[in-house]
Amino acid sequence: MASKGVNINGDRLNSTLQSTCSQWGALSTGTGMCRLTLTQEDKEVRDWLVKECQSLGCDVKVDQMGNIFAIRPGKEKGRKAIAMGSHLDTQPAGGRYDGILGVQAALEVLRTLHENKIETHCPIALIDWTNEEGARFPGAMMASGVWSQKSTTPLEACWALQDKEGVHMKDALEQTGYLGTTSCDHRENGLECHFELHIEQGPILEKEGKSVGVVTSVQGMKWFAIRVEGTEGHSGTTPMAGRADALVTASRLITAVRDAALKTELGVATVGVIQSDTSSQATIPAGVNFIIDVRCSTDDMVEQLAAAIFAEFDNITAQEKNRTSYKIERSWGLPETIFHQHCVESVRASAIRLVGENQVMDMKSRAGHDSAWTSRVCPTSIIFVPSKDGISHNPNEFTSEEDCALGAQTLLDAMLYYDRKVESGVF
Amino acid sequence: MASKGVNINGDRLNSTLQSTCSQWGALSTGTGMCRLTLTQEDKEVRDWLVKECQSLGCDVKVDQMGNIFAIRPGKEKGRKAIAMGSHLDTQPAGGRYDGILGVQAALEVLRTLHENKIETHCPIALIDWTNEEGARFPGAMMASGVWSQKSTTPLEACWALQDKEGVHMKDALEQTGYLGTTSCDHRENGLECHFELHIEQGPILEKEGKSVGVVTSVQGMKWFAIRVEGTEGHSGTTPMAGRADALVTASRLITAVRDAALKTELGVATVGVIQSDTSSQATIPAGVNFIIDVRCSTDDMVEQLAAAIFAEFDNITAQEKNRTSYKIERSWGLPETIFHQHCVESVRASAIRLVGENQVMDMKSRAGHDSAWTSRVCPTSIIFVPSKDGISHNPNEFTSEEDCALGAQTLLDAMLYYDRKVESGVF
């Protein structure tokens, strides 16, 4: 791999990524990570990132959702920035690449521009989006959603969310020093376009023997927070026949979620989170909460799969003689996304120039990304690099140093390609 | 209701019970209680109890499991005490009567003996058994089990147990000041016999129109801590077909627990506690823990029902192609109990004298009680009073002031009956 222009430093990218992961949020064994958003680990890596970007001559703004915008000025004053964004937070038992690679690659791009004294036409922004994982405060890609003004969960509703310990998101922002004053609204703090380097989190590139994925779309997703209610009682003295056991009903519903996805073949459906009101082995549970995650190629298919799931829910509660009931307490989602042709062209052309046409393929993303929200308000696309065995949200998540470097080089080249097209008036 | 001997004060019993519940552990509405063992609320009601008993001339000992023994001396020095024991802790959403009535009634008995200056032959003990509910540290009737030396969970294993916040039981004992020095072993700190007043926690007395239940046995119980393991993965990128979702399997197993109990009609089986490793909606759960509570009239039936449940577990994991697995991490239990004829006779005779034969019935307890453990090492029995609608482990748990008073009077009379029989050499 050799760029015809400026070259990123793959060793520096890798050593920075590994050392910051070791320092902030590493699990005790292997390369597993637990860096939940706005925790002490997340605060410290953010503080480090801000200093690094400032040392490269960037202006740093923090918005009301804690999103960090580090902006390297361009020749054209007052112009919106070409952005490279992703996230530094992880799942509770995640890896070192999902999100983190995108931000670290963006930093490597800034370092490369700086040491090569390259002047771009547009300003260049690195963005760290807050709470992409939604693992601490429920709602994935939360802060890019607020910024886009297209999410159904606006700023105040996000601020009011609580983690498992009852900490409000606004307080977590304040306590870490990341409750910024910049408006979290693309209309007041806009971007020229948004690129994101991300690991595939699936097995396709590896299986097809390709190095770079040009992501042209993201599947539609919807989440449903479900509450099941029954009647509490003593596990020893309440006869089986008359029980209204919320956990038995919830168990049947969770099984039905999986079965509906298998049967309809419309997409995937998962229950990742469950919580019961009781913590006593001797009490019949009266209340259970869980969240359903539904994802399909199109929004129509998402609706169809959700309808199949809830039809089965109604069957089950009827079979349970309606002693227990369920309700959908909240639903939110990310509509299907088609990326902008200018960004897709920038990525595709850059990747092909780097590794040749047969190492590059167009693909769809099955995971949600901040880019799906930015895409609603500015030209956007994603660059995928391979994930070993397709594993992600798992400490065994792995992408080789070479693939990370190739991704970062593609990011730099795509961004410069786009910048030249803007300068020449083509985009 | 009028005793032919000494009369307890029902108003005083009720006002003391209600006011101490309001002060220590009351939920915000109604008469619901959350007084988990060895919390601040539990410490404060214990401190109050100790002072009350001391003011009545009792010696107070605290053992290594925090069990409180308040002993009023008898005429015969060096004799073991006739005990009245129960527990002051509750479920996380429990009521004011389960356990609490037994201790408050024992205190009312001590007050009555004191104000009437009654000298008994044997010493009389009030006991508050620690962690009867097992709601904070898993394992119901834990500390009476240790005292009896018959439980499969000995002292050190109990001390090492952790609550949901990771606090060890030994530290909780120490922090509240209830890590006593008296040996938690009936061989070193024994009792003459043990009576317990308790609410029925079932609907039978109410349905049959009876006032007092003479409990002659307790059904057998066994608990199983289950761990289900699968493979973590991204909820968007992992195809449905290859998944090893621990929560889907756990859900099928939990449903099977209920179905096996319904089908075999051997007894009751309940899953009250569930916990998943993941707190992320976008992650396929890799590990789920839950506890099965099995109760039947006999130990044989408990074994049969457990066998039926685990046979179905094996079917289900085979159907899931053994991608997920389950294991029994720990099992513990309480064997079936037949109460001692001397104690049963004392309760039956006293109750019949108070309210007449047709208001009294023999019965079996379907809930576990500390008395089931004491019964293994000293004569024991339980007095039941009615539970409104059979409801328990629920804020709506209720027993009328009159029924509470009748129970306390029966407790006093039974204890004095037993004492006279000991004095006259019959028992």
Image: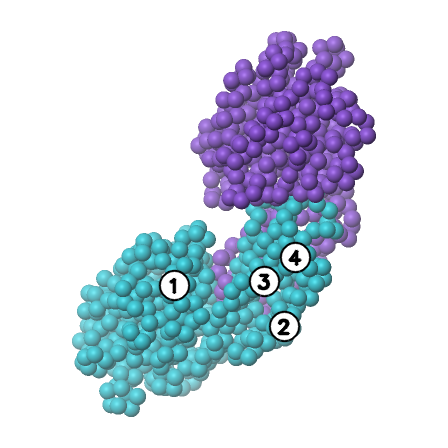
Chain colours: A purple, B cyan
Q: Which residue is mark 4?
A: B324
What residue is at 77 percent from the left and 34 percent from the top?
A210
Q: Can you identify the residue that label 2 sits on?
A: B308
Quadrant that contains the N terminus of chain A? top right
Which residue is located at x 27 percent, y 64 percent?
B181
**If you read the primary sequence from the N terminus, does the residue marked by circle 4 or circle 2 appear first?**
2
Q: Disc 4: which chain? A: B
**Relative image position of residue A404 (x, y in whole percent):** 66, 30
The kind of residue on which mark 2 rests is: Ala
- Give the CA distance from mark 4 to mark 2: 20 Å
Chain of the residue on which disc 2 is drawn: B
Report crowding for label 1: few under 14, some 14 to 19, many 20 or more residues within 10 A (C-alpha): few
Q: Are marks 4 and 3 on the same chain?
A: yes
Secondary structure under tag 3 reads strand
Q: Can marks 4 and 2 be said to lie on one chain?
A: yes
* Mark 3 → mark 2, Cα distance in angstroms: 16 Å
